[in-house]
Amino acid sequence: MITRERVEAVLDRVRPFLQADGGDIEVVDVTGNSADVRLTGICAGCPSAQMTLHLGVEMALREELPEFETLRLI
Amino acid sequence: MDTATATSDSLVVGRSARMRAVFEFLRVIGSSDSTVLITGESGTGKEVTATLIHESSRRKHHPFVAVSCALFSETLIESELFGHERGAFTGAIKDRPGRFELAEGGTIFLDDIDDVPLSMQVKLLRVLQNRTIERLGGTRTIAVNVRVIAGSKRDLKQMVAEGKFREDLYYRLNVLPVALPPLRERREDIPVLMDHFLQRYFRRRGEDQPQISDAVKQAFMRYNWPGNVRELENACERIAQTCTCGTVRVGCMSATILFRAGSQAPGPPLPAAAEPQQAAAVSLDDRLRELESNLIAWALRVSNGNKSRAAELLKIKRSTLGDRIARCALGGAPQTAEREPAAEAAGAARL
């Protein structure tokens, strides 16, 4: 089981970049080994940002938390 | 694949001292006919450099033929380079000139020379020495007037030491050596390259280059670029294809670059692998202190001087961070941290 703190720690790697661009990523829920996150701010409505962050966050979570399963961008 | 001409678009770009030195050297050797050996990691621009050398030489009105020696099997490479006569092997239904003949009067670029098998190396050596070739299955000796440029991603001298590359061929090739530095060793060129490629790809889309956010610039500066200029070029193409909102922001970047850049704390590189060979003493304590102080300065910078946040980033307690700041004499760290982006901005403005 992964914890919200561990997911947050991975997200913290890119937060400074996102925040500098007027955006952020928010952990909505962590259930079992999966997480729901939401893009907020300026990148929220951008399809490219959705793709970048979905792929990137999932990749980073899998690297750091081998037990991680699914990332849902909501 | 075989011929290429340098357009203003494909020239090597860079203003760092190391690239300026390379350009100066290229200017010096432009009029020469001697063999050039270009060494550089994958993606550093070996073929572009070879094209540049050809285009600035007296041979520029003759062919430039580029061959990747890694593409062919041991048997095929001989036929590719030297050609074959009809009936030389099954399927050789007609005479076919090789790349050396096709480059007559011009330049041949033998890329991935480090992938040429030892058995072929001796044949190449003969060609370089005698400037003659014999087609596969033929008996006629054909004189060739070709300037040879070789490209290698590995250090040939090291390969010679390991017995994987012929020493005589190495010396024959290494007449005019050109070493292309990896992008991570000339980071000051990253903004220039970014501008160059973004302009190119937005122009191809028929659009003006939009503004680029500072966060994107910082991520590009911090990323390590293992694929060098080629990787940076692809990253810029991706941005030009995906940016829809008029400003390039981090969301337009590749996820890999964003996350790798995010996990990379800036700071001086660790001692290079070459240093221990030089047997110079390295103070482990000093190096660790330097690393620690850089990481703390980085954390304070990205958290805008907020020590609790910086401590979270470094996965240490807030109180521990306080102690370490004192130990590293970083008392003025937040100020130092604020100065650094300003210095970066000034550097970018100069470019």
Image (cartoon, rainbow, N blue to C red):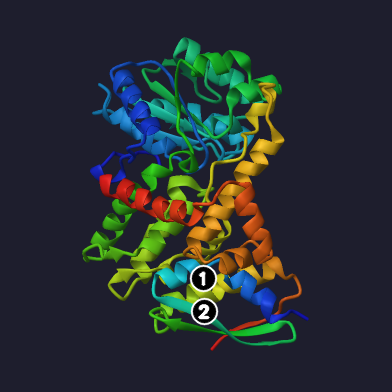
Residue in the image at 28% along x and 28% along y = B62
**Residue B252 location, quadrant:** bottom left
Residue in the image at 23% along x and 60% along y = B203
- Apparent side of residue B12 relative to residue B154 in the rendered image (left or right): left
Mark 1 falls on what kind of element? helix
Q: Of residues B210 and B145, which is closer to you in this image?
A: B210
User: Residue B43: x percent and y percent?
Assistant: 47, 44
User: Residue B127: x percent and y percent?
Assistant: 50, 16
Q: Of residues B230 and B342, which is closer to you in this image?
A: B342
* CB under 8 Å between discs 1 and 2: yes
Disc 2 target residue: A25
Distance between mark 1 and mark 2 Cα atoms: 7 Å
User: Residue B173: x percent and y percent?
Assistant: 50, 19
- Apparent side of residue B144 relative to residue B246 in the rendered image (left or right): right
Residue in the image at 64% along x and 43% along y = B289
* Mark 2 neighbour density, 10 Å: few (under 14) some (14–19) many (20 or more): many
Check chain identity for marks 1 and 2: say if they share one: yes
Q: Of residues B273 and B25, which is closer to you in this image?
A: B273
Disc 1 target residue: A15
Which subunit holds the residue at mark 1? A
| Type of the residue with mark 1 | Arg
Vertical arrangement, residue A52 with respect to residue B173, above or below: below
Q: Can residue B168 be seen by looking at this rendering?
A: yes
Which subunit holds the residue at mark 2? A
- Which image quarter holds the N terminus of chain A? bottom right
Q: Residue furthest right?
A: A1
User: Residue A21: x percent and y percent?
Assistant: 39, 71
